[in-house]
Image (cartoon, helix red, strand yellow):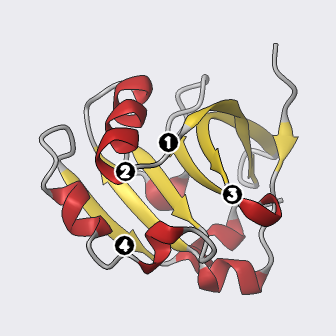
């Protein structure tokens, strides 16, 4: 069993993140492999993303894949379905959340959304307001 970590984001970090909601019927490992291939990243299975569900007063674990970059930053692909079949309320329409910090090369790539939308494994990609994460982070 892998160690679980709790991640929090400051208001400044949330404002500078690129947060994408992805709609896809594919399994995590297949989406991860596909993103690695089309975007040139190295997403790997990581410890679950712990999300504090304030309505339920409990922490939920969501499968997570990461590509670590400098300064302890990472891009994250988070499956929006916990082991208990709970979704993050603000993002119920999306199967995956793709979080890209400004330090990553994809943040500067204006074509990243187009690349994802042109994928045959992805049904939809939408840029989301990262500040909405604040209500769910403990």
Which one is nearer the viewer's eye here, 105 or 129? 105
Please name the residue that numbered disc 2 is placed on.
Answer: 94
Q: Is residue 1 left or right of residue 81?
A: right
The Cα–Cα distance between marks 4 and 3, rounded to whole angstroms, is 22 Å
Q: Residue at x 26, y 40 (%)?
A: 24
Please name the residue that numbered disc 3 is placed on.
Answer: 69
Tell me where residue 112 appears, x and y as whole percent.
31, 66
Q: Earlier in the sequence, mark 4 or mark 1?
A: 1
Image vertical order of residue 92 relative to residue 60, above or below:
below
Please name the residue that numbered disc 1 is placed on.
Answer: 80
Q: Residue at x 36, y 43 (%)?
A: 35
Please name the residue that numbered disc 4 is placed on.
Answer: 127
Image vertical order of residue 26 relative to residue 42, above or below:
above
Tell me where residue 46 appears, x and y as whole percent.
68, 32
| Mark in the foreground, 4 or 3 | 3
Q: Earlier in the sequence, mark 2 or mark 3?
A: 3
Q: Earlier in the sequence, mark 4 or mark 3?
A: 3
Q: Are marks 4 and 3 in contact (CB under 8 Å)?
A: no
């Amino acid at each position: 069993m892998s160690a679980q970590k709790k991640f929090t984001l400051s208001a400044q970090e949330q404002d500078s993140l690129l947060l994408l909601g992805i709609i896809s019927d594919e399994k995590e490992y297949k989406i991860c492999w596909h993103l690695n291939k089309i975007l040139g990243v190295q997403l790997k299975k990581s410890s679950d993303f712990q999300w504090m569900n304030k309505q339920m007063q409990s922490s939920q674990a969501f499968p997570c894949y990461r590509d670590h970059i400098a300064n302890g930053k990472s891009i994250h692909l988070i499956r929006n379905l916990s082991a208990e079949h709970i979704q993050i309320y603000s993002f119920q329409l999306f199967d995956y959340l793709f979080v890209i910090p400004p330090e990553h090369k994809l943040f500067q790539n204006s074509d990243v959304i187009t690349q994802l939308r042109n994928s045959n494994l992805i049904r939809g990609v939408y840029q989301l307001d990262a500040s909405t994460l604040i209500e769910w982070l403990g």
